[in-house]
Image (spheres, rainbow, N blue to C red):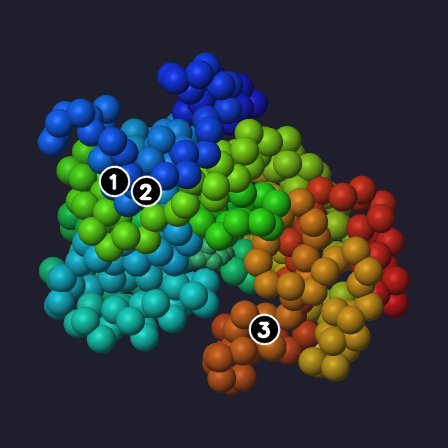
Amino acid sequence: MKPATKFIHAGAEPDPSTGAIMTPIYQTSTYVQEAPGKNKGYEYARSQNPTRKALEDALAVIENGKYGLAFSSGVAATDAVLKLLAPGDEVVTGNDLYGGTYRLFTKVFEKFGIRFKYVDMTDLAAIASAITPNTKLIWTETPTNPLMNITDIGAVTALAKQHQVLVCVDNTFASPYLQNPLDFGADIVMHSSTKYLGGHSDVIQGALVMNDTALRDQLYFIQKSCGAVPGPMDCFLVLRGIKTLHVRMQRHCENGEKVAGFLRQHPKVGKVYWCGFEDHPGYAVAKKQMRGFGGMMSFTLKDDSVETAMKVLSSTKIFSLAESLGGVESLINHPASMTHASIPREERIKNGLSDSLIRLSVGIEDLEDLVLDLEQAIG
Ligand SMILES: *Cc1c(COP(=O)(O)O)cnc(C)c1O
């Protein structure tokens, strides 16, 4: 099935009780049983809900996986994966992780005896040398936030398989339209559905997709035991978002390419980080594992100061100053003072996050309006 058909029909079955083409929002906490244990497969809504099931089936289809699980946020999905581990287990992960993931690892799971090794995930030798007999999981994002670094998913999973280590890929930035990590051997795909899957900045949600039945059973057990499940209304919103993911992503990619090109030739702009540029260090790998390069990018200003960046940030009229990404509307933010403010300046600069670095989530508005907005803001 081609993407456009898949994204619209994924998981969609007419509602068995009425024939409704859209899965209804089953706003219920429990289900009446004929006799104890004699029921229609639904007992209690933390364990099963038909709206959530329709979404979970759709998630599996769009990520080329067998099983989908929906969570009440992206970090709740990450939390569930980490709960597969036990004290003493080690995780090898990237040194430029999403801030919320880094916080969950360091502030919550380290306390329970899980150990994390942060390496450059574009460096296969660094990953290999971080693996020990205690390593149970490799956690990676690609492209990363905000510098758009690219991990070679196929190479990392091949390495992990030699050591019987699970690989989970946070696929939030690419979305399933541009990249399917399971096709390259990953064991689990994670999403913040809050971003491109929902696509309209109106819901917080997370997702996991996998192929292995035993792994699915373990993660389902964690989902129902720990209880970070999304409500049926939120599942409906993400299901609805998925139906237009392909058209939205096509426009995000088109606008992204043009905005990146505009920034690159601007005399006041320093470096532009977008993985579709042929001289981006991850370009060859991105081209191999992605179907397009998306609308996420960052850039620095030649006058590399917080003040100059602030001037740009406060001058845009269409790009809204906000955290998050992946919605239809364009967003702009300043990692140094927003998403990465908790990292000491020296370390931040060492990792390439300079003072003037600005991140864009290019939306699907009219391209000319977006370029004009940036033009007047950069001055
Ligand atoms: C937003 C985000 C998350 C966390 O998801 P929430 O839905 O905010 O809990 C995880 N990873 C990436 C890459 C994100 O952008």
Q: Give the quadrant of residue 271.
A: bottom right
> Looking at the picture, how far across and down is residue 328, in whole percent?
67, 45
Q: Which mark is residue 246?
A: none
Q: Which quarter of the image is occupied by the C terminus?
A: bottom right
Badge 3 crowding class, 10 Å Cα cut-off, few under 14, some 14 to 19, many 20 or more, is few
Element under label 2?
A: loop
Element under label 1?
A: loop
From the viewer's perspective, tell me whether residue 86 is left or right of residue 297. Answer: left
Residue at screen point 36% across, 43% down: 70
Which residue occupies the foreground of this view, 2 or 152? 2
Q: Are marks 1 and 2 in contact (CB under 8 Å)?
A: yes
Residue 355 visible (yes or no)? yes
* Kind of residue at badge 1: Tyr
Which residue occupies the foreground of this view, 168 or 126? 168
* Kind of residue at badge 2: Ser
Badge 1 crowding class, 10 Å Cα cut-off, few under 14, some 14 to 19, many 20 or more, is few
Residue at the top extreme?
A: 19
Which residue occupies the foreground of this view, 108 or 137? 108
Which residue occupies the foreground of this view, 119 or 205? 205
Pointer 1 residue:
44
Pointer 2 residue:
29
- Would you place residue 337 above or below residue 218 in this image? below
Q: Which mark is residue 338?
A: 3
> Looking at the picture, how far across and down is residue 153, in whole percent?
37, 45
Q: How many marks?
A: 3
